[in-house]
Image: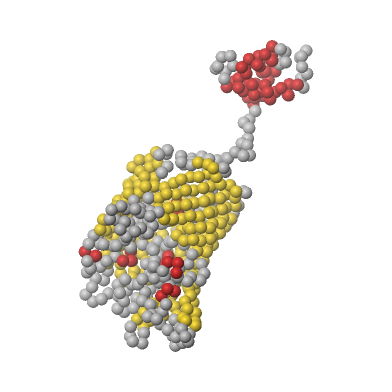
Amino acid sequence: MHPYPKKSLPLLAPVVGALLTFTTAFAQQPQDPNKLLVDLLVKKGILTAQDVATLRQELANTPPAPVASGAMEAPSSAAPGSVPPVETEKKSPLFFRIGGAQFTPFGFVDFTTVYRGTLNGGDIGSSFGSIPYSNTANGQLSETRESLKNSRLGLRVDSDVMGAKVMGYLETDFLGNAATNVNVASNSDVLRMRVFFLDMRKGDWEFLAGQDWSMMTPNRKGISPLPSDLFFSQDVDTNYQVGLVWGRTPQARVMYHASDELTFGLSLENPDQYVGGAVVLPAGFTATQVDQGANGTATPNVFPDTIGKVAFDTKFGDLPFHVDAAGLVRYFKINTFTSTVNADSDKTGYGGSINASLGVMPNLLLLVNGFDSKGGGRYLSTGLGPDFIVNPPDASGAYTMSLVHSDAGIAGFEWDATPMSKIYGYYGMVKYGQKTDQLANGTYVGYGYPGSPNSQNKQIEEYTAGLTQTLWKEAGYGDLKLMLQYSYVDRTPWYVAPGTPNKAHMNMGYVNLRYDLP
């Protein structure tokens, strides 16, 4: 007879099973203590050889234990525009954890050289609206600049909070407002904030607060807030491409993911009633009521810019397709206050855009963006024209406003010719309408009037071709890229004085060496 009741065997099974597991793992090692203990239990009659064989067979047939509830599983594919989950696979080698949050530093070091055939007066970001004419000294000079200002430092933080995916995102560069003597001896370039926001998604709803790219900026994927999911071109130029609708502004937005393919969004963004430096204002108007390009936070904006957007993502076979449409509503207001008049004048600006990208063959993407507005000038390629003009006093002595029509567009392609080579090309343009008013003395105010200065642009066009060549890449160490861009820009004013050039032209080339963190 068995010296112990058979019902004792199940009680011993977990202990013996563990011992057998260790015994198997260390079977190559002589005098393994676990094996000696199992042999002792057999020798003392507690277990028979058949008991040990049975337990070995049961262990071999037992499936692996499920992942514990506290363990992280590999993430599934995220819906377009969603906040990616905290990843456990393919993490950046630089990531680290504090508590339940995953911190991922990112960035790159840029060494940029730009050559322009005329003296543009800008930095590595081109001033498209002030290309000099050939009948000026600046039009006869060229310029070459070298800079590391576009180098970038950033940090992303992902966490799960009460069932919601929460992401904090900070991105900086060194294109801040530097001292005027920065190029004399020490290029002490200034760190600046690009984007800094907190994003939370729970279920189908997503919320964002902070500074991010405007929701008017074309997307590549859904209505994602991440820069990698936006279209602002592959250009090295830090002012990107003429025709791009964009901004980086404080905002609060909400998004609803109706499905993996369809997303709706609404954003309230920091306003700025912008006329720029080219608009001629009436002599008696208090100019601090509008932003002439240098008013900063002094401009008395009334209500945030309101932007609605819908995005659709799908595939035709294996080829991606994205389209989004956005609507913009803005509110402007000025006041006339004199000893006899206290009157407000307000206008509602509006605009809309449609943006699409379509894979036409593997690794080749066609892109098209279109924008039209009355009062949306500030969003076009760093504010190349005004939102509105201010009219002379009416019969009651009050100033009023008139909205300026503006539109823009980009068409182009991006081709991953090889896994290490991306070739791209774009055509972009902006157009501004004329809006003027004539005074009793025969002179004009506004934008685009007869005899207006050639700083009042009617149309600006840019043709761009570029190559991004990865020279070296290693998963644990990052990559090294050579980035080349050539652009030709035309600037056409509303009025051309007799005997003067009817356009301003600029050729420019960029050579950029970039090291990306892994």
Where does the image place residue 408, in percent across and percent down from the top left? 39, 65
Q: Relative to residue 413, is residue 302 drawn left or right?
A: right
Where does the image place residue 281, in percent across and percent down from the top left? 38, 77
Quadrant where the C terminus is found in the figure: top left
Relative vertical location of residue 245 with respect to residue 81 in this rendering, above or below: below
Quadrant of residue 436 in the image? Answer: bottom left
- Residue at (22% x, 66% y) in the render: 137
Q: Residue furthest top?
A: 43
Where does the image place residue 479, in percent across and percent down from the top left? 38, 42
- Residue at (52% x, 62% y) in the render: 267
- Residue at (39% x, 45% y) in the render: 516
Relative vertical location of residue 258 with respect to residue 438 in this rendering, above or below: above
Q: Is residue 3 visible?
A: yes
Relative vertical location of residue 477 with respect to residue 84 in this rendering, above or below: above
Quadrant where the N terminus is found in the figure: top right
Q: Is residue 436 visible?
A: no
Where does the image place residue 336, in percent across and percent down from the top left? 46, 81
Front position in the image: 109 or 220: 109
| Count of marks overlaid on the render | 0
Front position in the image: 290 or 246: 290
